[in-house]
Amino acid sequence: MKSLSKLVGALVVGFVGVANAEQVIVYEAPLGMSGSEPLFIPPVERQVDGLYYDSARKQVLYRTAAGPIVCAEDATTLGETYLKDTGNCRLIRSTEQRSFDDGFDVREEPVAKVVFDAQTSTAPQHAAAPR
């Protein structure tokens, strides 16, 4: 729940048009460094076209050709508002080994990756009318 709200806060969600319902890599970064000199590669964050917050509905929505899918909704606990995950939009975390060439050596380093995956094949929860 908190990871989704942090990710939505970190993503730039300005867009126009309808997004394709497919997996999108939203974050990549090297996990660890080896050798005497650290390898400074900034993380790569990507915008998810079609992902936005609708303040009238109080929902995080993902636009598809079939209509918007609700990824998260505002919820309140003890007077504090947070985003509650609906389970319709998964964030898949993984790591993979990748070759890095620093100009002198080529070495394998683990890279963390997060993929956004909207659940369009199951019966998704579609957006409710504005409240």
Image (cartoon, helix red, strand yellow):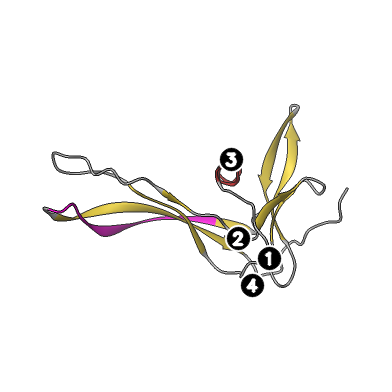
Question: Gap between marks 4 and 2, in whole Å?
Answer: 19 Å
Determine whether the residue tagged by mark 2 lies in a helix, strand or loop.
Answer: loop
Q: Quadrant of residue 82?
A: top right
Q: Earlier in the sequence, mark 4 or mark 3?
A: 3
Determine whether the residue tagged by mark 1 lies in a helix, strand or loop.
Answer: loop
Q: Earlier in the sequence, mark 3 or mark 2?
A: 3
- Which residue has dot 4 on it? 121
35 over 97 or under it: above or below: above
Task: Pick whichever, 50 or 71, lies toward us.
Answer: 50
Determine whether the residue tagged by mark 3 lies in a helix, strand or loop.
Answer: helix
Do tag 1 and tag 2 residues touch (Cβ < 8 Å)? yes
Do tag 3 and tag 2 residues touch (Cβ < 8 Å)? no
Horizontal and vertical percent position of residue 126: 76, 62
Mark number for residue 49?
A: 2
Residue type pointed to by label 3 = Lys
Horizontal and vertical percent position of residue 116: 54, 58
Residue type pointed to by label 1 = Gly
Mark number for residue 2?
A: 3
Stretch in magenta: 91-103
Q: Quadrant of residue 69?
A: bottom right
Q: Residue at x 71, y 69 (%)?
A: 123
